Image (cartoon, grey):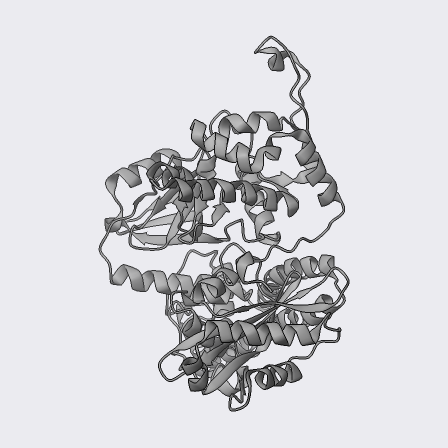
Amino acid sequence: MSRAHSTSKELQLEASKLAYQILSGFDKSFRRYSRITSGAQERFESCQWQASQQAIKERILTYHHSLSDVVSDIYRYINPAKLSDEFWHKCKQQYSKLLSGHPQFELAETFFNSVIGRIYRHQRIDDALMFVLPSRCYLAGQDREKVVNSFDTTGTVRAMYEDIFAIYRFNVEFENFELDLSNLDTALRQRLNTKQLASVHTVEMLKSVFYRGKAAYLVGRICMPDETLPFVIALQMTDHGMLRTDALLTERAHMSVIFGFARSYFMAQTQHPAELVAFLQELLPHKKHFELYTSLGFYKHGKTVFYRNFLQHLDNSNDAFELAPGIKGLVMAVFHLPSYGVVFKIIRDEFAESKKITREHVIDRYKLVKMSDRVGRMADTHEYINFSFPRDRFDPSLLAHLLETCANSIQLLENEIVIKHMYIERKMTPLNIYLQQEQDDEKAENAIKDLGLCIKQIALANIFPGDMLHKNFGITKTGRVIFYDYDEICFMNERNFRALPKSDDPYALDTLSVGPEDVFPEQFKHFIVGKKQLKDWLQKHHGDLFTPEYWQGAQRKASKHLIHNFTPYPESIRF
């Protein structure tokens, strides 16, 4: 379909048709997404935990399938390579017009970007062709009544709770509803003094119920004249298939962990994601928009919003990109911008001799984590193709290091450095650095205790972490230990946990029959942490990690495909 002799009117008509085709593809994709999400309540109520895990994977993949369908359809009718920039400019203009009043306009912009990215193989990031910048700013609050229920607070606290549960109904019995109401009543009175309680003028709750694993959350806020507090009712399904209220969360720190970057995406049905995210950010102002979109499963749009936020930060900062603190990795080169909260990870061209893996294997491991239940212990990552950085912001030593280790992934332009393939990840303090710097023994011991718990919880999620050197873990500002090195992870049944053979010969292990899948847990004590005091703490709190029996038991549990519930808030606030 040649455009050489097309009139402006013909070009406009063809661009309009294509814009409509792309938007129709997005709408179909969102319907698929919504259908999977809307099934969360039934899966929760009927304790279909395996189906819930499968739904997470299916929902992630549905975007890719929808995108492939649309791009394939485009290629059936036209050859995009022969289309002029003018055509795409008009297509974007027509698409923008179609988005007027669209309830998911921002997600539809990202879908358009994905189509253009696929056609141009991510080699053109141009706001004239795609929505590098949003078509319009969303005014928070304009659709508030579509996402929020408001509850009367003029009566008693108990009456308010009864009103809430009259709206949020489940097709399953509460284990002890009277006790739940009493616990909720007491909890709120303990958090708010009499004056605060009397000043509450509104309780607002998002209409969406947030499902994840064996838990469901009713998310809202308490509105008082001088302050607004989170108001989150955490529900859990018991082993007997009955519902119970587990906690009332009124602190932003506790709510923040629920929406953390190391957990699976929520299943929360909404037709108005921009308004829902705006409400959440009012509750969690330190969370960026892209983090909240991602937590809801809109991870593709999360990537778009991240990029926009990143460009804005570059315009308002002047520090240089440099190597990230910590021991240099054998598989990844990692750098950061000190003033920004993520790290950038590039797969090295060659790995150290000790790493018997390939580049394809590393990419596959990161996909595995994306599809797995991260149980609050494995950092989420976002994959980018042809990501452009300003060349003058790169520290010379960083650029030299990247050209030495990752040259195949680097393209140098006059004013830009293009990374052909990389991952971004939330920035944390590497655990080895934290333990070197922490002078408070109690805090250091707590970090070691949480390290062991982190390893155990990952294993219960059917993942063997593989390389468990403490440099491969980070620690958050709240003291939570998170794993972030995935090149050696595998499923639990892919390893053979054995007792270390006994011999007087220290080199006997080299001569014994040892298979590539054999793992000797007794050796973990020698390399997870280095200093004797750290080893002693790990032995004290998690000595069973050094026994094959523990890992064999974890294997048996994993083989039963049980879904474990790891509560993301402190035990002290549970009822």
Answer whether residue 36 is visible to the viewer in this image: no
- Which quadrant of the figure has residue 489? top right
x and y percent of residue 177 in the render?
A: 69, 75
Q: Is residue 171 left or right of residue 335?
A: right
Vertical order, 327 against 136 (above or below) = above
Answer whether residue 176 is visible to the viewer in this image: yes
- Which quadrant of the figure has residue 31? bottom right
x and y percent of residue 575 in the render?
A: 60, 65
Looking at this view, is 101 or 442 the one in front? 442
x and y percent of residue 448 in the render?
A: 48, 40
x and y percent of residue 506 in the render?
A: 57, 11
Q: Residue at the spot x=28%, y=59% of the render?
A: 314
Vertical order, 147 against 410 (above or below) = below
Looking at this view, is 427 or 301 the one in front? 427
Vertical order, 159 against 353 (above or below) = below
Q: Is residue 368 left or right of residue 302?
A: right
Looking at this view, is 437 or 84 the one in front? 437
Q: Is residue 283 left or right of residue 325?
A: right
Looking at this view, is 106 or 474 the one in front? 474
Q: Residue at the spot x=55%, y=74% of the render?
A: 186
Q: Residue furthest top?
A: 505
Q: Residue at the spot x=51%, y=59% of the render?
A: 118
Q: Is residue 311 left or right of residue 574?
A: left
Q: Residue furthest front?
A: 194
Q: Residue at the spot x=30%, y=41% of the render?
A: 399
